[in-house]
Image (cartoon, rainbow, N blue to C red):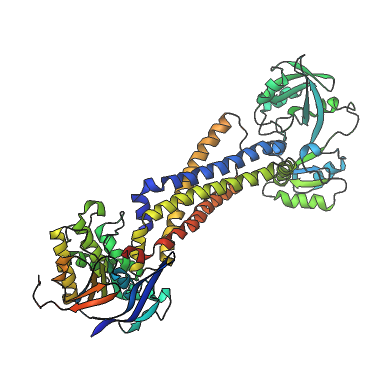
């Protein structure tokens, strides 16, 4: 069988190039907006994703980390008693008010109180052991380097949190929050900074690591079975909860769906128009094949095969472009995040654009009426 | 023996308020293994007649029996199948795919007939050699002359070994020498392969070479003559 679709694509590549580019840029747009949204809203789960804990225990029904309520020490006991839990660590979370030098005004900040020992789980991926050690000094704090300008204080500078004087002892990467500034401190500092002066059990979460080879979801389910006044999640599901809560709380989730629909429609229109033009240019040849007895079905398959190849080529080009752009974005500290399901969803949408365009372009073949060749 | 029998064909078009009758009760029997020419001025209905006789277009009235099969008894698909199995076409424009070499153009319809690549290639090579393009079969249409392109188109129609070959003005885009080659080829196909060749043309060069010439005007056949044997033989 002569591969008519492929031979024509290669021979007339200039004619099909706009369609391929439309597909590639549609894919790039779909992926970049998903990467940006997940990057921005991924910040709401940064506590979870930058930490090495695999099970989180907090107030029942907590949708996102900043909505946590204090929980009692019995949650810690439950974790410690679980046979598959290897380590448990408290995590304090305090909403607070930051006052920098005159002229910078106030800032809402989120103070995280963490275990400052070298093997601490919270922010294990964002802080070095030396930085953790530095936090052990009372009222020492660390912020994301991207937040320094907003806070108006350099490293080594001082500011007030809820009226207490703190000092910035360093900066880290990848701990930016959404709608405020993350300030990392020791558990003791966080307790002292809380409004009530640290009398209560101001611990919002306990986090735990499970023994090697143990599925965290099994442990979480076991904790939940006997839980009263607290609940357990795996790190992955708690992170997903936080991201989706914020996405739909802010309307960004619907925005993503809306924009993806627009990109899909625009991509499909451009691609189908290009395909239609290419087919219209060969309509006499198709009509001749039809005269020779080749049915419309096999001719439609030629068009759909061309559309599928355009999709594949556009997809490859889109992936290359996306890798470049995502690399550039992360280098410039633009929040972008992609994962395998996002890649797969974008690839599926891109192939969808190509095939929908092919299906639309097939209509041009109706013009391949051989009787026209006889006039 | 008649390979193609048409009876009481009528066909008309409505253009605005005007009704134009292209064929008016035309009947015709085309004999097998002959080169039959339908000649006539443009607009006399000869192309419409060809498209009906080949099953491309359904007439308003009348019947066509091709190879003992009622062409319009079945649906469009049945006619597609009939054409795939039994007919070849040569058009005024060569209508070759720009991306395919001469050999691939000829192999293409065989693939749709379910013939394996190896056999299709062998048959296509033989057919291209028969039309004198043995040396040129790896070239794209852009690299071929008009006459060579028309010979590729003839090979593409002929490779299917059709019982019926329809040709519409096959020489009108060609110069004298190339026109002569095409005429000789069509005649050889009729006599050598036993194919029924029905050709529509107003090219006077073809008249002398046809076994039978039907003169058409205003939707009817005015004259039916058989030039003396050998008169224009190549």
Give the total of numbered labels: 0
Query: Residue, x 87% and y 46% (percent of image)?
Result: A229
Query: Considering the image in quadrants, where does the N terminus of chain B appear?
Result: bottom left
Q: Position of residue A318 (x, y in %)?
A: 49, 43
Is any atom of residue A268 visible in this view?
yes
A92 or B108, nearer to the observer: B108
Query: Considering the image in quadrants, where does the C terminus of chain B appear?
Result: bottom left
Q: Is residue A102 above or below residue A38?
A: above
Is any atom of residue A210 visible in this view?
no
| B119 to the left or right of A206 | left
Q: Is residue A257 above or below residue B107?
A: above
Q: Is residue A105 above or below residue B100?
A: above
Q: Quadrant of residue B110?
A: bottom left
Q: Position of residue A299 (x, y in %)?
A: 41, 63
Query: Residue, x 8% and y 74% (percent of image)?
Result: B231
A40 or B177, nearer to the observer: B177
Q: Position of residue B212 (x, y in %)?
A: 18, 77
| A323 to the left or right of A98 | left
B195 or A34, nearer to the observer: B195
Q: Position of residue A272 (x, y in %)?
A: 48, 52
| B151 to the left or right of A121 | left
Query: Residue, x 68% and y 20% (percent of image)?
Result: A149
Q: Is residue B8 above or below residue B148?
A: below
Query: Residue, x 34% and y 79% (percent of image)?
Result: B9
| Residue furthest to the top | A102
């Amino acid at each position: 069988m002569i591969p008519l679709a492929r031979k024509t694509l290669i021979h007339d590549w200039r004619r099909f190039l706009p369609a391929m580019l439309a597909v590639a840029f549609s894919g790039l747009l779909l992926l970049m907006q998903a990467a940006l949204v997940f990057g921005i809203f991924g910040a709401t789960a940064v506590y979870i994703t930058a930490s090495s804990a695999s099970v989180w225990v907090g107030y029942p029904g907590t949708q996102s980390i900043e909505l946590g309520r204090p929980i009692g020490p019995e949650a810690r006991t439950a974790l410690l008693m679980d046979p598959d839990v290897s380590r448990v660590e408290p995590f304090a979370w305090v909403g607070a008010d930051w006052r920098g030098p005159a002229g910078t005004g106030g800032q809402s900040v989120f103070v995280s109180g963490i275990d400052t020992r070298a093997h601490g789980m919270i922010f294990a991926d964002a802080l070095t052991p030396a930085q953790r050690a530095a936090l052990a000094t009372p009222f020492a704090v660390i912020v994301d380097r991207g937040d320094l300008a907003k806070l108006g204080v350099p490293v080594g500078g001082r500011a007030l949190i809820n009226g207490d004087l703190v000092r910035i002892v360093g900066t880290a990467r990848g701990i930016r929050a959404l709608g405020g500034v993350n300030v990392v401190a020791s558990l003791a500092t966080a307790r002292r900074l809380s409004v009530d002066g640290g009398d209560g059990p101001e611990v919002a979460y306990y986090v735990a690591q499970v023994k090697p080879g143990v599925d965290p979801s099994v442990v979480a389910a076991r904790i939940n079975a006997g839980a009263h006044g607290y609940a357990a999640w795996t790190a992955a599901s708690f992170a997903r909860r936080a991201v989706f809560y914020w996405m739909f709380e802010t309307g960004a989730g619907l925005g993503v769906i809306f924009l993806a629909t627009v990109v899909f429609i625009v991509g499909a229109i451009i691609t189908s128009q290009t395909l239609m033009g290419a087919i219209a240019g060969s309509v006499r040849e198709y009509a001749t094949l039809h005269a020779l007895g080749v049915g419309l079905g096999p001719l439609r398959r030629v068009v759909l095969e061309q559309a599928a190849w355009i999709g594949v080529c556009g997809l490859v080009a889109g992936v290359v472009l996306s890798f470049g752009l995502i690399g550039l974005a992360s280098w410039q500290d633009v929040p972008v995040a992609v994962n395998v399901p996002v890649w797969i969803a974008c690839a599926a949408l891109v192939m969808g654009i190509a095939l929908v365009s092919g299906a639309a372009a097939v209509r041009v073949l109706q013009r391949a009426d051989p009787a026209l060749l006889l006039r | 023996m008649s390979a193609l029998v048409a009876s009481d064909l009528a066909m008309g078009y409505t253009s605005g308020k005007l009704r134009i009758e292209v064929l008016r009760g035309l009947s015709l029997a085309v004999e097998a293994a002959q080169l039959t020419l339908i000649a006539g001025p443009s607009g006399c209905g000869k192309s419409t007649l060809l498209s009906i006789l080949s099953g491309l277009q359904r007439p308003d009235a009348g019947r066509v029996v091709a190879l003992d099969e009622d062409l319009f008894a079945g649906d469009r698909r049945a006619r597609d199948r009939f054409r795939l199995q039994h007919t070849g076409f040569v058009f005024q424009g060569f209508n070759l795919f720009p991306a395919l070499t001469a050999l691939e153009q000829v192999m293409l319809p065989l693939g749709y007939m379910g013939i394996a690549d190896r056999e299709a290639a062998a048959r296509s090579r033989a057919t291209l050699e028969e039309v004198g393009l043995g040396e040129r079969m790896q070239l794209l249409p852009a690299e071929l002359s008009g006459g060579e392109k028309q010979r590729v188109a003839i090979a593409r129609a002929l490779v299917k070994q059709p019982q019926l070959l329809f040709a519409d003005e096959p020489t009108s885009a060609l110069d004298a020498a190339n026109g002569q080659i095409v005429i000789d080829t069509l005649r050889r196909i009729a006599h050598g392969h036993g194919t029924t060749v029905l050709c529509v043309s107003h090219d006077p060069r073809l008249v002398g070479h046809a076994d039978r010439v039907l003169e058409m005007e205003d939707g009817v056949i005015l004259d039916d003559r058989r030039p003396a044997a050998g008169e224009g033989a190549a």
